[in-house]
Image (cartoon, rainbow, N blue to C red):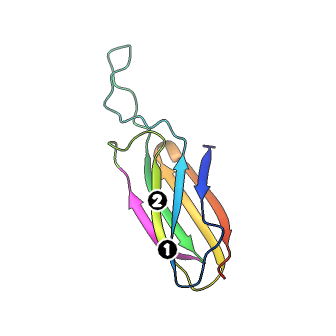
Amino acid sequence: MARVLINIPRNIRAGEAFAIRTLIQHGMESGYRPDGAGGVLARDIITSFTASFEGEEVFAVELSPAVAANPFITFTLRLQGSGTLRLRWRGDDGFDQSEIRQITVT
């Protein structure tokens, strides 16, 4: 399991936009770098990231081999009420990790 940092503001007001910042520690191998034996290192990247609030997808992005190691993804939301946010990263070799956070809107 990769280490994940998620930054969500503590004070969120209904209808106001706010930023969610995520950082996931992942080595990200592009699949183009040579190995010591003259071959190529196998690709190992995060290929997609999605965010869902109360089961409805609110943000999604597809990533390519050009993305840096430890991808930092930020997006904004505008919510009317409190609920559950689910963040999900998927990648090569069956990598699939989710984090769930409760968001309180005042």
Quadrant location of the C terminus in the rendered image: bottom right
Amino acid type indicated by mark 2: Thr
Q: Which residue does the image show at 66% across and 80% down from the upper left?
A: 82
Q: Name the residue at 49% across, 74% down.
A: 77
Give coordinates of residue 50: x percent, y percent. Answer: 49, 63
**Vertical placement of residue 75 versus 43, above or below:** below
Mark 2: give few (<14), some (14-19) or many (20+) Cα within 10 Å: few
> Exactly how many numbered labels are in the figure?
2
Residue 105 percent location from the top left of the image? 65, 79
Residue 98 is one of the magenta-drawn residues: no
Label annotation for residue 3: none
Comparing 38 with 64, the one in front is: 64
The residue identified by callout 1 is 77
Residue 29 drawn at (x, y percent): 41, 34
The answer to which image quadrant residue 38 occupies is top left
Task: Find disc 2 in the rendering and name its residue.
Answer: 74
The secondary structure type at the circle numbered 1 is strand
**Relative to 10, 25 lies left or right:** left
Q: Which residues are magenta?
A: 55-63
Q: Which secondary structure, mark 2? A: strand
Q: Is 62 colored magenta in this rendering?
A: yes
